[in-house]
């Protein structure tokens, strides 16, 4: 009996020692992280910060929509938008109360929509009423300055949006050349966003293209080389063209974050017809309803992407209805390495790192996913109203430096076409009276 008791006691002591050793080993492997929170400045509990419902991409019959300018503004006003940008193709917005300079050739190609009708803006009186919130208890709607969809007419729909700069009027663009308009718009003080990249990469039909290094490197380099290009469209329209663009986005983040650059994830309706205005939009956390504060939010990432459609996350036939999922508070505990999201109108919160869904729930403990999280984590909320995308949090182990991968420059057809067009235009067209006449009459350049 004594032998049995001694043996049992020895086993218990050994088990305790092994347990302590295991715990010690775990303690030694727990890492400390520097977590960058794009919403760090937002005062969630005060009254100074508000969430402004924003539409950054929609069309009128000034380019290829079939709704008048004044009616587009009125419809957004009815839908409780706080901010609206008109982004017609190759057409710089002059404001809701002024008809833009149009591109006749473009409108003629889309004649079934435009009918080549004269543009009807808001009257100055109605413009002031909407700016000051008449009929909405003083809650006015902001007119975003100089919105435009660049690369107006290119075969692969390689489009990007420009804001706050008088650039791109009548410029049809070179297919696949995002680099030139992003750079030139930035030189004039504007900012740009890359639109529905799945139409260019063909990822809408071939999902593997979102993992294609050629595409990943091309767009990563644009963000690294052009600071005024602040983000990309990850979900627009009915999420058909952009259904696989979240994959591309995650791949780009892994390339750019080691260089200290985080492109933001935008969502918008890209509406051309009645009933399409509310398919997707952004909610910007701002202290003032001004173009200056909107620009700050777009550059710093203090906003959320909202979409009624999200085919990979919510299913092919899902259409969000009613109140949309919204974030009401974000807390980052830098001592415990946790991120907590509080929200409303949602059923679930999913956390994503390196393109993989790694966790669910309101709080994520970074230490629980040390092998999965290499440089960032992002989240999205889902509910009956749709999906809400939270901007990425960069996550870097303290005392370490992320490895910067070599990102080779992409040489594609657009590289050759841009050089060809530049040379041909200078040699043959720059001083040609016939070309001048074509640009004046067909493209509306004066």
Image: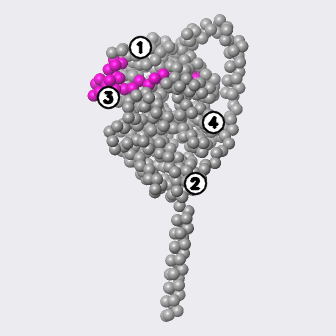
Q: Nearer the viewer, mark 4 or mark 1?
A: 4
Q: What is the crowding at mark 3: few (fewer than 14 residues within 10 Å), some, or many (at least 20)? A: some
Q: Could you tell me how far apart the alpha carbons at marks 2 and 3 are, in whole angstroms?
A: 48 Å
Q: Position of residue 101 (x, y in %)?
A: 50, 13
Which residue position holds label 4? 221
Q: Could you tell me how far apart the alpha carbons at marks 1 and 3 are, in whole angstroms?
A: 24 Å
Which residue position holds label 3? 139
Q: Position of residue 167 (x, y in %)?
A: 55, 20
Q: Position of residue 193 (x, y in %)?
A: 53, 31
Q: Position of residue 45 (x, y in %)?
A: 34, 44
Q: Nearer the viewer, residue 27 or 314?
A: 27
Q: Secondary structure at mark 4?
A: helix
Residue 96 quadrant? top left
Which residue position holds label 1? 120
Sooner in the amino-acid sequence: mark 2 or mark 1: 1
Identify the residue at image location x=38%, y=35%.
287
Q: Could you tell me how far apart the alpha carbons at marks 4 and 1 are, in whole angstroms?
A: 40 Å
Which residue position holds label 2? 399
Sooner in the amino-acid sequence: mark 2 or mark 3: 3
Q: Nearer the viewer, mark 1 or mark 3?
A: 3
Q: Which residues are magenta?
A: 126-153
Q: Is residue 70 left or right of residue 437?
A: left
Q: Secondary structure at mark 3?
A: loop
Q: Nearer the viewer, residue 245 or 39?
A: 39
Q: Secondary structure at mark 1?
A: loop
Q: Nearer the viewer, residue 168 or 299?
A: 299
The image shows residue 10, relative to residue 344, as above or below, that is: below
Sooner in the amino-acid sequence: mark 3 or mark 4: 3
Q: Nearer the viewer, mark 2 or mark 1?
A: 2
* Residue 320 on the magenta span: no
């Amino acid at each position: 009996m004594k032998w049995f008791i001694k043996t049992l006691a020895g086993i218990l002591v050994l088990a305790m020692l092994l347990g302590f050793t295991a715990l010690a080993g775990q303690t030694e492997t727990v890492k400390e992280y520097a977590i960058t929170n794009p919403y760090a400045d937002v005062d969630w509990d005060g009254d100074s910060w508000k969430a402004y419902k924003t539409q950054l991409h929609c069309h009128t019959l000034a380019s290829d929509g079939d709704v008048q300018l004044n009616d587009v503004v009125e419809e957004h006003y009815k839908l409780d938008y706080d901010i609206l940008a008109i982004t017609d193709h190759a057409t710089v917005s002059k404001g809701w109360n002024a008809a833009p300079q149009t591109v006749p050739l473009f409108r003629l190609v889309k004649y079934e929509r435009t009918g080549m009708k004269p543009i009807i803006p808001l009257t100055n009186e109605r413009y002031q009423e909407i700016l000051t919130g008449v009929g909405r208890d003083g809650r006015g709607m902001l007119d975003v300055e100089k919105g435009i969809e660049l690369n107006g007419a290119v075969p692969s729909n390689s489009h990007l949006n420009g804001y706050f700069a008088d650039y791109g009027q009548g410029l049809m663009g070179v297919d696949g050349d995002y680099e030139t308009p992003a750079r030139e718009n930035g030189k004039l003080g504007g900012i740009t966003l890359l639109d529905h990249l799945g139409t260019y990469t063909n990822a809408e039909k071939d999902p593997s293209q979102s993992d294609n290094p050629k595409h990943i490197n091309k767009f990563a380099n644009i963000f690294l080389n052009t600071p005024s290009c602040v983000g990309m469209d990850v979900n627009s329209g009915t999420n058909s063209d952009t259904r696989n663009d979240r994959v591309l986005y995650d791949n780009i983040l892994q390339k750019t974050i080691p260089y200290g650059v985080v492109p933001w994830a935008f969502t918008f309706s890209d509406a051309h017809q009645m009933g399409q205005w509310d398919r997707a939009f952004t909610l910007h956390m701002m202290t003032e309803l001004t173009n200056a504060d909107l620009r700050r939010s777009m550059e710093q990432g203090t906003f959320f992407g909202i979409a009624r459609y999200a085919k990979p996350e919510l299913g092919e036939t899902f259409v969000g209805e009613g109140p949309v999922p919204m974030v009401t508070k974000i807390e980052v505990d830098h001592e415990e390495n946790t991120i907590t999201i509080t929200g409303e109108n949602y059923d679930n919160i999913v956390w994503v790192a390196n393109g993989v869904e790694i966790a669910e729930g309101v709080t994520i403990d970074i230490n629980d996913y040390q092998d999965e999280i290499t440089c960032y984590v992002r989240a999205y909320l889902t509910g009956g109203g749709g999906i809400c995308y939270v901007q990425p949090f960069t996550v870097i182990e303290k005392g370490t430096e992320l490895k910067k991968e070599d990102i080779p420059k992409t040489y594609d057809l657009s590289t050759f076409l841009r050089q060809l067009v530049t040379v041909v235009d200078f040699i043959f067209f720059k001083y040609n009276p016939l070309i001048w006449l074509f640009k004046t009459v067909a493209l509306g350049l004066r």
